[in-house]
Structure formats: C-alpha cells, structure tokens
Amino acid sequence: MRAFVAVLALASTTGCYTLRADVPGVMRDRVDDAVIVGTFDETVTRTYFFGGLIGPSDQDLFRDAMLESARAHQADGVANLMFEARFSPMDYALSIGTCAVVAPRTYRLKGDLVRLRGAPAPGRPLLNGPVVDDTRAP
Amino acid sequence: MRSRALLLVLCAAASSTGCYRYVTRLPGVVDLRTDGEGAERATEVRIDPDTRREGIAALALGGGAELRAGHVSVEERHYWFLGAIPILNTSARDEVAAAVGASGALRRVTIGEEMSAFDAFMAVVGRLLPLAQYVLPSYTFSFSGDAVMAPPRAGSQNAPPPIDDVAPAPLPATPGVDEPPSLLDAPLPPAGAP
C-alpha cells in the first residue's frame, strides 16, 4: 500500500514517459523557394523504468541526427516534419515480460531535408562542422 | 463471439502499428543554418484565439496554443479506444501552426510527450467512471519555443545581402526525392530555377 501511494505521488509530480526533445535551429512558419534534397527519418526507443516513472533526461534525442543528415545532404533545414510516439510490439512485450519494470517507448521524427534561400536568423551557425557520412541516407 | 472478433481486430491493429500511437504533423520549416540566438525577440506576437481552450475543454483536451511573455506553448491531450484506435484530439497540427505563426519564427523549440500528472491522476480516478476505462490513460503532446523576429524571406526588399557570393551548387540527384512529397508545405521552385 505504501509503495502504491509512493508511486502515485511520484506519478502525480513528474508524470510518466516524459519526453522533451530539442529541435535545433529556428522554426519558421514558411519560407520561399525551398528545394527538397533528401529525407530525414530518425527512430529512437527510449527505455523507461517502473511504468515510465523513471527515464532518461537527455533532450538531444533528434538534434544530432537532424544536423548530421542535413550536413550529409548539404541541406539547410527540414520541412514537413512528422512526430510519432508509440509502444511498438517489442516495447509492449518487454513491458509485459518485466511487469513494467522496463517500459520502453518508441519515438520517430521524419521530414524532408530542404535547401533554403534567403537570410537565416542571426545566431551561431549550426552546420559548419565536418560533413558526416550518414549511413541512414537513402 | 462479437467481442472476440473485436478483440482480434484490436490486437491486429496494435501489433501492426503499435499501442498508444500518436502521430502529428508539425507545420513550418526548421532552419538549421543558425541557432537563432542573435535574433531579436518578437514584439508583435499573436495567436489565433480559436486554438486556445479554457475550462473543462482545457482539462479534457489540453490548453491548446498559449502565449506567455514571448514564449509560445502547445498542450494537446489525446485519447485512444483500448489503446489502439485514436479517438480524440488526434493531431496538434492546427495548434502548432498557430504557435509557429505567432511571430513567424521560433527558437529553442522543444517537442515532447508524456503521461502528465493529470493524465496519471485521471488514469486512476477516471476508471471509476463508466466507459472511461476504455479510453484511459490519455497522453499529452507538448510543443514550445521562444518567438523571435522572422528573418526576411528570399526576394524581400528588406533582405540583407547574401552571406556569400558563391552561387548555389546544382542539387544532387537523391533517389526517391523526385517524387512529389505527399506532405509538402514548402513551395517548390519554378522549373529552371537553380
């Protein structure tokens, strides 16, 4: 009973399966003359514990992959983003098999890599690093 | 017999797409050239009031798009029937569009999802209500960012000079991208454009 109350109290303060993922760069409502040069598609499974109460706190879930994909395709941005969260069959099997002690959830972010024209917003450049070989590229 | 058939359909749906699956499109374009930290904070920020919820609707479906001191946020609560079929608030597209369009540009954007404290509370308490047990627990999608002045678009008279004089290189032929994308929001250049 004490454990149940403790779990309920923890859930009521922190929530479960908490994900906060940073999106690098500047999100704009629309741009002119964007040219699609590739696709970005990243799927990540995050492992939570105790029914999602405890999980990783990293916020760079998609950041590095997005920047690496953009560099590999010589793109400047990502358009038509789609976010997906789900329990895959494997997540569910693992969760049931461990009585939710291990409880993964799968997240996916996909979009079209685009080359942009026009001035960027003032700030530190993000794409000036070395070009990374992106094996995920089609 | 009918309930067994329904169970089979739900199991088939869950095994093919996953359980508690939430998909939303995010309008706008992420400009990865800079982090936007040097951009001025937007002075004129407005959010479509139709995308904001109050009272019971905010509790049930999330607060929608909200603006607070130049920081825009979106909170969307979504539900499934038996964890397999999305039934309420299935997309945050309109609310995210309102948030991004508030000033035309956002920096420090985060996206996320969680079973919030309210979701967890309702998952326990709501099961006492008839039928509620079939649509709980709910999850909450979130989106946030700081509104900044949108950089001028290409061709605008207020556009600053280009950052370099190098003509853009011809686009590499990328397999699979010549097909018209189904989710295309960004306009394609006219034929013959570099």
Image (cartoon, helix red, strand yellow):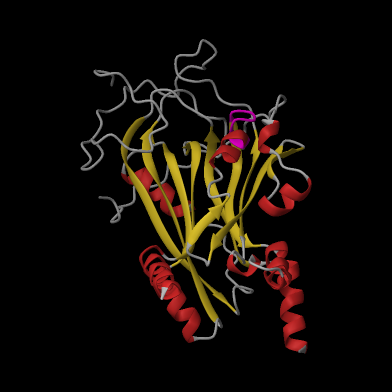
Q: Quadrant of the image for the N terminus of chain A?
A: bottom right
Residue at point 42%, 71% (across, down): B2
Residue A63 lies, with reference to residue A123, above or below; the image says below
Q: Position of residue B53 (x, y in %)?
A: 72, 42
Q: Residue furthest front?
A: B1
The residue range painted magenta reads B99-104
Residue farthest top in this picture: B157
Residue found at x 68% / y 50%: B62
Name the residue: 23% across, 40% down. Answer: B174
Name the side, left or right, on which B91 lies relative to B53. Answer: left
Horizontally, residue A48 falls left or right of residue A69, namely right
Please, is residue B73 above or below residue A98 in the view? above
Q: What predominant SS class does the magenta segment belong to? A: loop
Indicate whether residue B72 is drawn in magenta: no
The residue lying toward the viewer, choosing from B143 and B11, is B11
The percent position of residue B50, horizontal first and vertical second, equals 67, 33
Where residue A4 appears, x then y in whole percent? 73, 84
